[in-house]
Amino acid sequence: MKKRRIIQAIILIALLSVGTVFFFPRSMLHFDEPISEITVMLVHMAEAGKIEDTTYNYTPNDAEYSLILDCLQDYSYHYSYGTIKSLVTYHTSHSVGMEGNDAGYWIYIYLDTATERHTMNCGGTGEIMIDDFVYRVDYVGNRTQLEMMERLRSIVTPE
């Protein structure tokens, strides 16, 4: 009976640990160095299957630079099944990808520091690719990610 309780306790601790790792939110901006430049690329499908993109570059002197950083600071991501899948795929074939586009456009964000470039890609499916690995912005669905994408789009293309 005592052995059974110990096994149950170990299983409970393992499940709580896995749950904590998967559901614990991480900041979008967790870099050791300050960001020196931000590049935002909006990509959408034009007529007849053509892909059109528009690129915007910002430095710390631009008002949009701090607005983009503030927007990214308001959101977080967490590990998911897609993270595990992307880790396996990356280590076996060195290629990772996401599928789907619920927003009707994609946003690619490049955050440059003095020594490296960090990338974020999203299409509104609830998943986000950060530095070649797939994570989730929403726990269920894609509402939060669509909101984040719309905020970013309104910053770079004020109309």
Image: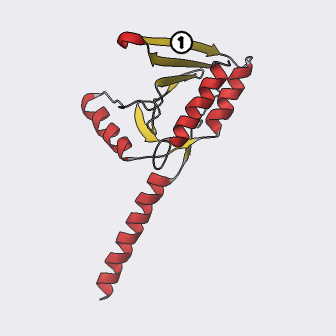
The residue at the point 41 percent across, 37 percent down is 134
The residue at the point 43 percent across, 61 percent down is 17
Q: Position of residue 144 (x, y in %)?
A: 55, 42
Q: Position of residue 55 (x, y in %)?
A: 55, 13
User: Between residues 131 and 39, which one lies in front from this camera angle?
Assistant: 39
Q: Position of residue 39 (x, y in %)?
A: 57, 18
**Observer able to see residue 31:** no
**Callout 1: few (<14), some (14-19), or many (20+) C-alpha neighbours within 10 Å?**
few
Seen from this angle, which residue lies furthest bottom? 1
| Residue 2 location, quadrant | bottom left
User: Between residues 72 and 50, which one lies in front from this camera angle?
Assistant: 50
The kind of residue on which mark 1 rests is Thr
Q: Position of residue 116 (x, y in %)?
A: 53, 22
Q: Which residue is label 1 attached to?
A: 54
Q: Give the side of residue 5 with respect to residue 58, left or right.
A: left
Label total for image = 1
The residue at the point 30 percent across, 83 percent down is 3
**Observer able to see residue 72:** yes
Relative to 81, residue 109 above or below: above
Seen from this angle, which residue lies furthest left? 92
Q: Give the side of residue 11 with respect to residue 64, left or right.
A: left
The residue at the point 48 percent across, 41 percent down is 142
Give the structural element (helix, strand or loop) at label 1: strand
| Residue 101 location, quadrant | top left
Q: Quadrant of the C terminus?
A: top right
